[in-house]
Every structure is written in C-alpha cells, then in structure tokens.
C-alpha cells in the first residue's frame, strides 16, 4: 500500500490544476491510464470563456450560460465559476500559457477575444485553434517540475475503496483506490483521504466522437460503483461541426470559426440555419446539431458545409492554422472551398453530482471538470465554459478537501484495506469478443441514443445493454484484469447510465430531444435527473 495526501485521477486541465494546488500542501499522485498528455482537455480547440472586456460583464456571461442551459443550470454555481474565472486565468498566464494578443497599435497587451455560439459578447481567450494543448502543455511542464507530484502514467484506476465496501457503517467515505500498473500487471493500493476524479468525459460511448480514445466514462462508472450520486447523463452534447472525410474521421472544427464569420450551408451553398433559429450559425450547439441532423435526413446528403471563404485567406490561416493544415492534407483548401461537416458526440453535461466545490455525495471524493456535474452547464453547455469550469472547480476542490480533512490530523477510524486478489482468474484468450462488444455498444448508442431519441429506441438500447453488462461482468470476474476489460466495463456502465437518465426524462430539454415529447414540460419547474445506486 502506498500512501498519498492527495490522489488525482486524470491528467487534463482539471486534474493537473488540482494536483499543482494540492502539491503546495502534501504528496500528490496523478493517475493516468495513458501518457500524461492524453486527455480531453488537450484536444480542446476553441478556448476559455472568461470576462475580460469592459464591453462585457459577469452578469452577461451568467445570462448567456443560463439561456444555453435551458432552465437546468444552478445559477449560484454559474455565478461563482464566472466570477472566479479571471483569477484562474491570471494563474495560467503566470504559468506561461500564451493566449493570443491583439496586434493593433496600442492594444498588444490585450487578449484577442473571440466569440462562439450562444455568447453575446467576445469573451473567449484562445491560443490559435489549439487552446487546450497550450494550457495542458504548460500544466504538464509545471507538474513534471513539482517534487511533490508523482505522475503514474500507464496506470489504470480500477475502483474506489470506500468504508462501506470494507463494512463501515458509521459513514461512507473514500479511502483510496486500486490501480492497475499496465507495465508490470500488478494492482497497486493507493491510500488517501482526499481523492479527486478528473477523468474527463465519455465520448467513446458513441460510434462517432470528437473525443480521444481515453474518453470511456471511467470516472462516472467508478463513482457509480462506489455509491456516489449521478446526475443528468441524458445531456450529451454533439458538436455540430466535425470534419466529414474518411481520412480524418471525427476531427473537430472549432465553434470559434463560426464566431469569426463562418456560416453553415447546404450542398447548394445556401444558408439554412435561419430556418431554425434567428441567431443563425451562432445558435447554441444543441440547436445547430439538431438542425444539421434534420437537414441531412431531409436532403439525403451525407453532410452539410461550413463556409469561411468570405474571410481573407491570411486571416483564416492565422486564426485556424491547425484546421487549415489538417483540411489541406485531405485536399480541402478552406480559404477557397467550404468544409464538409457532420455532428459527433463531444461532451457530457451530466456526471457525478457535485456542488460548486466539486464535492460528491461521498466524503473525501471530489469530481472536477467534465466528469462532474456542478450545475454550470444545465441541459446544454455554453461553448468554452468547460475549461473555465476545470480550473475554477479544481481550485475550490483542493480548498474544500483541506478544510474537511486537515493535513496532519487523523481523519476518522482507520480501516484495514485488503490487497488486490486475482484468485484463479485466467489470462483472457479472445480479445475479439471484447472488441465486438465495444463496437456493439458504440453502434447501438449512436443509432438509438444520439441527437434525436424515441421511447422505443431507448427501450431497445436498455434491453441490449442489460445483456451486455452481464457478459462484461463475466469477463471481469473470470479473466485477469487488463485495460481492455476495464475500459469495456466502464463503457457499458456509462452507456447504461445515459440510457437510464434519458428514459426518466419525459420531455425535450436542451440536448435531450425525444420525438415522443418534442417540447419542454413547462407545467412544472425543471428538475435534475438524479440516480442513486443505494
């Protein structure tokens, strides 16, 4: 057993921000199942939404967030995160993060703010079209230099250890977690009173996604098995503009491009978004994704197009260098022709239910970033609010854990934590079965639980997922654990939670759209969908 003052699971913006703050107070382990560079955060293109201009205000940012959230945002949480944003931005800049600056005479010290869908003001800080990579690169550099941080790469978090699992009845709190060392095959026991989940989202639950391969819903599944409350998993955001090309599947085209003047057009070059929303191509993501889905089904075309050819070529290349080069590599010059795009699964707005400090229903466990559900996003996330939430809630989570579990004090009864026992489990002999189940889950979620849903589709998905869960549990108990088995176990658990939440919402709201009830239920106040295992 290895003891740490803090254990952070995940190496994105939320996890590393939390680790760096926690390292000022004690020893920190950062558990990440691939290299530390592999995270959802590092793939974020657009930027960080934060009030920086006299033409903007906290109240306006809050209002834009509430409108996008379709009645389910927690206004208190929204206000806290929005107001604390500038201080966290200052920390990132002090760490070396290079947000783009304006080049006009006399304005070179001001941030070059852009605007994205749902925002009424320019407030998105960015580093070209690779903001997430810039932020995480600087966080990683700082973490590698911090002597109090141990980076456990290629270590897969299996399950949380709780007092309830060990027979405790006085309280249920987290004591640490079991972790698979993928290099040695050994299962480690990490003991800590302060555990922070920052595992990102679950985009790989779907066949088409903008997320990296690591986004398999690990944190939500672990928290659920440990007894934490889960909320609003039906609200899966589909990014409207993902490059449609066989050589670059699921490459995201940032919303900032629409903020800088790009418009959505059909195969004839005609704009169509005004038919769906007066804000046109700058409408919030849920509206744009459904509109594109409808246009594709109406016309039978495989995609629609994003056209930024009205802008000068040098402007496009400067602001979107990575997108320009990526498209050019597959024969598309975005300065001369529109980009073929389709929606793809992008972000989970629900997750482990938390307060604005990231505190879950389990003592000692916090969830930060996409894995958590603070109430910031409600039924639909406002563009570029996600990185903001990561850095703000990470700061608050560390402060809370230090308050609840002071350093240097005994925090309640001590428990004898057993070492991991593999028993007579065998090495798995047919990975093809795992890959088949993985593929089936992703296809059925795309077919039955994506942008447009129905009660019958959800029922079919739920029935098949119940059978798949039984099959996966057999793999888990009969074979030695591996990253393949663990990811499949988490994937099917998270998929089931999405379907369970979706079946419980008998209305259309935000990202959850069902043909059976195509309008919101305005006869009562909107409520969260909350699941509890026990």
Image: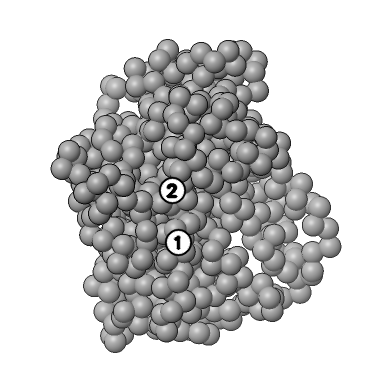
Q: Earlier in the sequence, mark 1 or mark 2?
A: 2
Residue at 33%, 32% in the rendered image:
118
To which residue does mark 2 refer? 128
Q: Camera-side residue: 423 or 514? A: 514
Question: Where does the image place residue 478, in percent across and percent down from the top left?
Answer: 74, 64
Q: Is residue 69 left or right of residue 465?
A: left
| Residue drawn where x is 34% and y is 74% of the image | 22
On the image, the x and y values in percent for residue 376 come to 31, 45
Residue 78: image tag: none
Camera sees residue 505? no
Q: How crowded is the residue under tag 1: few (<14 C-alpha within 10 Å), some, or many (20+)?
A: many
| Residues tagged 1 and 2 counted as in contact (Cβ below 8 A) | no
Residue occupying the point 63% across, 39% down: 328
| Residue position marked by numbered label 1 in the rendering | 136
SS for callout 1: helix
Q: Position of residue 289 (x, y in %)?
A: 49, 28
Q: Is residue 445 left or right of residue 410?
A: right
How far separated are the C-alphas under marks 1 and 2?
15 Å
Residue 308, given in percent of the width and then of the height, sits at 48, 28
Residue sticking out furthest to the front: 105
């Amino acid at each position: 057993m290895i003891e740490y003052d803090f254990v952070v699971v995940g190496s994105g913006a939320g996890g590393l921000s939390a680790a760096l703050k926690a390292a000022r107070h004690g020893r920190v382990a950062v558990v990440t199942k691939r290299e530390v560079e592999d995270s959802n955060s590092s793939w974020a293109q657009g930027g960080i939404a934060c009030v920086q201009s006299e033409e903007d205000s906290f109240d306006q940012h809050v209002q834009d967030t509430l409108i996008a959230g379709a009645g389910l945002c927690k206004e208190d949480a929204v206000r806290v995160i929005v107001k604390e944003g500038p201080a966290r931005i200052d920390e990132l800049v002090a760490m070396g993060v290079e947000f783009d600056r304006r080049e006009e005479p006399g304005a070179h010290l001001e941030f070059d703010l852009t605007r994205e869908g749902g925002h009424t003001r320019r407030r998105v800080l960015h580093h070209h079209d690779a903001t997430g990579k810039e932020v995480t690169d600087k966080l990683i550099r700082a973490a590698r230099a911090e002597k109090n941080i141990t980076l456990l790469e290629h270590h897969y978090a299996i399950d949380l250890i709780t007092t309830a699992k060990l027979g405790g009845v006085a309280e249920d709190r987290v004591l640490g977690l079991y972790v698979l060392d993928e290099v040695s095959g050994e299962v480690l026991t990490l003991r800590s009173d302060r555990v922070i989940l920052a595992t990102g989202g679950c985009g790989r639950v779907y066949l088409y996604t903008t997320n990296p391969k690591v986004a398999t819903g690990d944190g939500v599944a672990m928290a659920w098995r440990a007894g934490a409350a889960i909320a609003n998993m039906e609200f899966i955001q589909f990014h409207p503009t993902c490059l449609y090309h066989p050589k670059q599947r699921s490459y995201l085209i940032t919303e900032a491009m629409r903020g800088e003047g790009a418009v959505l057009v059909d195969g004839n070059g005609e704009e169509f978004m005004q038919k769906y929303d007066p804000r046109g191509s700058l409408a919030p993501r849920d509206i744009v994704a459904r509109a594109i889905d409808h246009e594709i089904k109406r016309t039978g075309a495989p995609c629609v197009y994003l056209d930024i050819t009205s802008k000068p070529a040098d402007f496009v290349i400067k602001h979107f260098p990575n997108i320009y080069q990526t498209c050019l590599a597959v024969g598309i010059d975005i300065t001369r022709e529109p980009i073929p795009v389709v929606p793809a699964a992008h972000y989970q707005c629900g997750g482990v239910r938390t307060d604005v400090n990231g505190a879950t229903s389990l003592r000692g466990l916090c969830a930060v970033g996409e894995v958590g559900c603070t109430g910031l996003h409600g039924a639909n996330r406002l563009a570029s609010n996600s990185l903001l939430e990561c850095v703000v809630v990470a700061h608050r989570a560390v402060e809370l854990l230090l308050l609840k579990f002071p350093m240097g004090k005994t925090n309640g009864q001590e428990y004898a934590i057993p070492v991991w026992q593999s028993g007579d489990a065998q090495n798995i002999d047919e990975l093809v079965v795992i890959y088949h189940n993985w593929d089936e889950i992703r296809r059925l979620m795309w077919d039955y639980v994506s942008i447009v849903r129905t009660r019958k589709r959800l029922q079919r998905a739920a029935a098949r997922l119940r059978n798949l869960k039984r099959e996966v549990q057999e793999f888990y108990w009969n074979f030695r654990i591996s990253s393949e088995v663990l990811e499949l176990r988490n994937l099917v658990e998270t998929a089931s939670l999405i379907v369970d939440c979706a079946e419980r919402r008998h209305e259309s709201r935000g990202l959850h759209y069902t043909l059976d009830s195509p309008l919101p239920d305005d006869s009562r106040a909107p409520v969260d969908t909350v699941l509890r295992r026990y």
